């Protein structure tokens, strides 16, 4: 076996035994996947996945960013150029390059996820390296050719109860309509991600605003028309199953400007002559506007701030966005969220889930905020911190102030569909390890720990996202 059955459990035998008992209660619960980036086209068309490299390497920035950090070119890994220039397309060649360098992933969560995927999904039991590369490739390719490895079959095999994708306002949601009309029982829903029509620094912002007006019939050249266009699309997304919106702003800044100032700011942004400070102020105002709309329509609001997107201009120019060069930075929440919280912080109709890439904010800002404001809950460790150590730090830093019930369980936030069960498995093991330590130190009873484990693995996510 590639993985030990006691992985991630405490080393102390008595505490490990408690963790085993807790994990047995949650290991086979259905998966709630309330936020992620899997492609709805997979489930709509239900076609056979491409070769192993195209499934597991080319689209996964966790994989190719590590390889690139060691000097391996993205084009040699099959990552497409933005202009369509030729890259390596031989799946076996890409896979061999990956296998030769698999040692680079030692001690990373990517290694855990991949090893569990290799073992549990494809039945592989020998380590991946240059010698076993072709064995891996052939085994995975043979599996992918079968109907029981099509997207819908894997959804059912993974015991997924619901999975949420993420789409921009101008997306017609055709794949979601196809899924809904197909008669398949799988639940694949969307989430409203308006960054492309909110962020003036988004590369196609002005064109997106124009298309938003066309698709809604609203005059998006005016502030009232622009807001009405958002309401229109949110209503459409909700009708297609959405229960949440998602906001990936550079910071957590919010604002609550007088109406006249907002209109003037919008005019400046729309004219394309706004400064960086004005762009930030507009994004800040729009978070508050989105909160106001959530109060009205009930969509749960997710805020994912704190990433410097596309940090390398060279990679962005050659390969486009989302190519492994989004980098965390320090993020302020107390002052940044105050305008929004002054207006809606105690309104029972609003539900906001906060995420961070700045772990220093857990105990200093986020846990105290969520431990006081009824509208706030803490999302799980995200992106660079959805690792065993990152998850354990989150529980240690947030639990004593926010408790367990101002958090929302786990979500996998991934494009890598085959790794979803492994990601949930890691989260459940870490939560059980944390709870087992609490039991062994006589902070909570084992019966309480069992109830909390069930909540963290299943119930909290389902409730928080209104699923």
Image (cartoon, grey):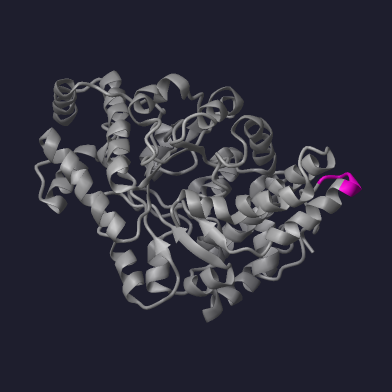
- Most foreground residue, 285 or 38: 285
Judged from this view, the residue extending furthest toward the bottom is: 147
Judged from this view, the residue extending furthest toward the right is: 13
Question: In this rendering, is residue 440 above or below 79?
Answer: above
Q: Which of the 4 image quadrants contains residue 98?
A: bottom right
Residue 465 appearing in the image: yes
Please identify the dominant SS of the magenta region.
Answer: loop
From the top left corner, tell me how far across and down residue 454 is, in percent.
65, 55
User: Quick check: 94 left or right of 278?
Assistant: right
User: Quick check: 29 left or right of 372?
Assistant: right
Query: At 72% across and 68% down in the image, what residue appears?
Result: 124
For the magenta stretch, what is the residue range?
10-14
Can residue 11 be found in the magenta stretch?
yes
From the top left corner, tell me how far across and down residue 312 is, in percent.
44, 32
- Most foreground residue, 234 or 84: 234
From the top left corner, tell me how far across and down residue 424 is, in percent.
62, 55
Q: Which of the 4 image quadrants contains residue 123?
A: bottom right
In the rendered view of the protein, which quadrant contains the N terminus?
bottom right
- Most foreground residue, 53 or 41: 41
Question: In this rendering, is residue 123 above or below 308?
Answer: below
Query: At 28% across and 24% down in the image, what residue appears?
Result: 256
In the rendered view of the protein, which quadrant contains the C terminus?
bottom left
């Amino acid at each position: 076996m590639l993985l030990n059955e006691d992985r991630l459990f405490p080393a102390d035998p008595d505490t490990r035994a408690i963790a085993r008992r807790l994990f047995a209660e949650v290991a086979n619960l259905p998966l709630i996947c309330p936020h992620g980036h899997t492609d709805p086209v997979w489930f709509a068309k239900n076609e056979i996945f491409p070769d192993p490299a195209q499934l597991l390497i080319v689209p996964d920035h966790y994989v190719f960013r590590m390889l690139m950090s060691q000097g391996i070119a993205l084009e040699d890994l099959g990552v497409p150029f933005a202009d369509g220039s030729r890259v390596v397309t031989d799946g076996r060649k890409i896979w061999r390059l990956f296998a030769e360098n698999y040692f680079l992933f030692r001690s990373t969560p990517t290694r855990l996820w991949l090893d569990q995927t290799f073992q549990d999904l494809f039945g592989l039991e020998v380590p991946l390296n240059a010698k076993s590369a072709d064995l891996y490739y052939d085994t995975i390719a043979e599996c992918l050719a079968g109907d029981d490895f099509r997207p819908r079959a894997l959804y059912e095999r993974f015991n997924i109860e619901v999975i949420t994708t993420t789409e921009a306002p101008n997306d017609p949601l055709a794949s979601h309509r196809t899924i809904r009309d197909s008669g398949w029982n799988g639940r694949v829903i969307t989430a409203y991600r308006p960054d492309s029509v909110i962020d003036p620094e988004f590369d196609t912002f002005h064109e997106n605003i124009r298309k938003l007006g066309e698709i809604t019939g609203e005059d998006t050249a005016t502030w009232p028309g622009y807001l009405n266009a958002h309401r229109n699309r949110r209503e459409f997304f909700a009708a297609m199953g959405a229960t949440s919106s998602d906001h990936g702003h550079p910071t957590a800044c919010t604002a609550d400007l007088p109406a006249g100032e907002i209109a003037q700011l919008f005019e400046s942004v729309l004219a394309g002559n706004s400064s960086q400070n004005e762009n930030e102020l507009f994004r800040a105002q729009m978070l508050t506007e989105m909160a106001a709309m959530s109060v009205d329509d009930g969509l749960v609001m997710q805020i994912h701030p704190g990433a410097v997107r596309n940090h390398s201009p060279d990679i962005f120019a050659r390969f486009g966005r989302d190519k492994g060069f989004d980098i965390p930075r320090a993020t302020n929440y107390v002052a940044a969220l105050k305008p929004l919280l002054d207006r809606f912080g105690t309104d029972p109709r609003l539900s906001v889930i906060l995420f961070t890439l700045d772990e220093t904010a857990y105990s200093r800002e986020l846990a105290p905020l969520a431990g006081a404001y009824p509208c706030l809950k803490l999302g799980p460790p995200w992106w660079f911190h959805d690792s065993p150590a990152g998850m354990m730090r989150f529980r240690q830093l947030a639990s004593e102030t926010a408790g367990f019930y101002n958090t929302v369980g786990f979500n996998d936030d991934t494009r890598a569909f085959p790794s979803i069960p492994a990601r949930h498995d890691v989260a459940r093991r870490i939560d059980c390890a944390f709870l087992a330590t609490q039991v062994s130190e006589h902070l909570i009873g084992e019966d309480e720990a069992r109830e909390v484990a069930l909540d963290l693995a299943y119930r909290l996510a389902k409730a928080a996202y209104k699923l």
